[in-house]
Image: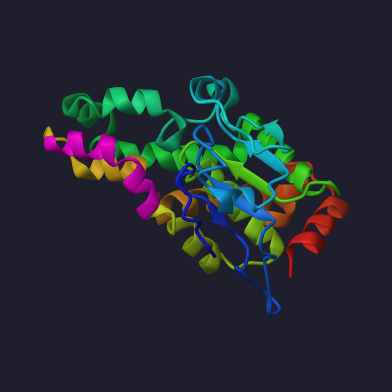
Amino acid sequence: MPQFDASTIINLRDLGGIALTGNSAVRPGLLLRSGQLDRLDPALDPAVAALGIHTVVDLRTEHERSRRPDRVPEGARLIVADVMAGGVVATGGDGMPARLETVLGNPAVAEEHLGNGKAEKLLCDAYRAFVTSEPACAAYRLLFSALAEPDCGPLLFHCTAGKDRTGWAATVLLLLLGADEDTVMEEYLAVNPVVRAAFAPLIDPFTAAGGDPEIADAILGVRPGYLAAALEQMHRSHGGVEAYVREALGIPDEAVDRVRARCVA
């Protein structure tokens, strides 16, 4: 699955080409994921402009959006789908960059609040809440409803770093289209190098000041256990992706059929 060499959008990836059951694959150029679009400049990224993005779904909080508003491609519509509205979902990872700057600025504070496995537990809890919390379900409902619209066009969905909220959205979408869980996990973990490079200005001073690299890695990377926690919660609560999308997200079968017809090559 191609990763774009974009200078003004971090972690821009096309889900096109990912293998699905029945010798099929995701159709290229329709399903795009990334980090925030606050620095998007089509003049500097002509390859991005050529994508013809028609719909942008922003999964970030109001705080994140106000600090770093999206620069939406010309002619595209913006849909706000706040996964963590009201602070229901546990914060962490790409969700609270301002708090991360504070915590990772003080190794002692980081050790107190995130050491001894607390950081990993925080992220696992957040991923489970992606499945169970009403704000998260409402946000992902908006995303999948947009995908089912006839005039959706190429759609880009994103959060801040494009790893957690975006990672779960990509996982559900790929499973629904027919990818197996090994393929989904591979796509999920593939963002790690880019995300860690993007967060280097936070990580390097933290570790240089004596901060535990394990804490930084747990918070700023993605790990198999995080996605496994969400998948386990989905199977426990709904039995699988089809029922999760139908029951928790409220997406009717005919809408799922439209998404599959358009996105499977």
Q: Is residue 7 magenta?
A: no
* Residue plotted at (57% across, 42% down): 42
Q: Quadrant of the C terminus?
A: bottom right
> Quadrant location of residue 166?
top right
Q: Quadrant of the N terminus?
A: bottom right
Whether residue 187 is situated above or below residue 162 in the rendered picture:
below
User: Along the line of sight, which residue is nearer the eye, 101 or 77?
Assistant: 77
- In the image, 105 versus 249, the foreground residue is 105
Side (left or right) of 100 relative to 131: left
Quarter-wise, where is residue 93 in the image?
A: top left
Looking at the image, the residue that sits furthest to the front is 43
Left or right, residue 155 beside residue 250: left
Depth order, front residue of 132/219:
219
Quarter of image, res 213: top left
User: Residue 168's spot in the image, x, y percent?
Assistant: 56, 48
Image coordinates of residue 175 in percent, x first then y, are 64, 60
Q: Nearer the viewer, residue 197 or 190?
A: 197
At 46% across and 55% down in the image, what residue appears? 5
- Residue 169's x, y, as percent? 60, 47
Q: How is the image coloured?
A: rainbow
Q: Using the rendered image of the protein, determine whether residue 189 is visible from the camera's viewpoint.
A: yes
Q: Which residues are magenta?
A: 193-208
The residue depicted at 66 percent of the width and 63 percent of the height is 28
Question: Is residue 84 rendered to the left or right of residue 146?
Answer: left
Whether residue 140 is visible here, answered yes or no, is no
Look at the picture and state if 225 lies above or below 63.
below
Residue 201 forms part of the magenta stretch: yes
| Type of secondary structure dominating the magenta stretch | helix
Q: Is 186 left, or right, of 196 in this rendering?
A: right
Q: Residue furthest toward the bottom? A: 23
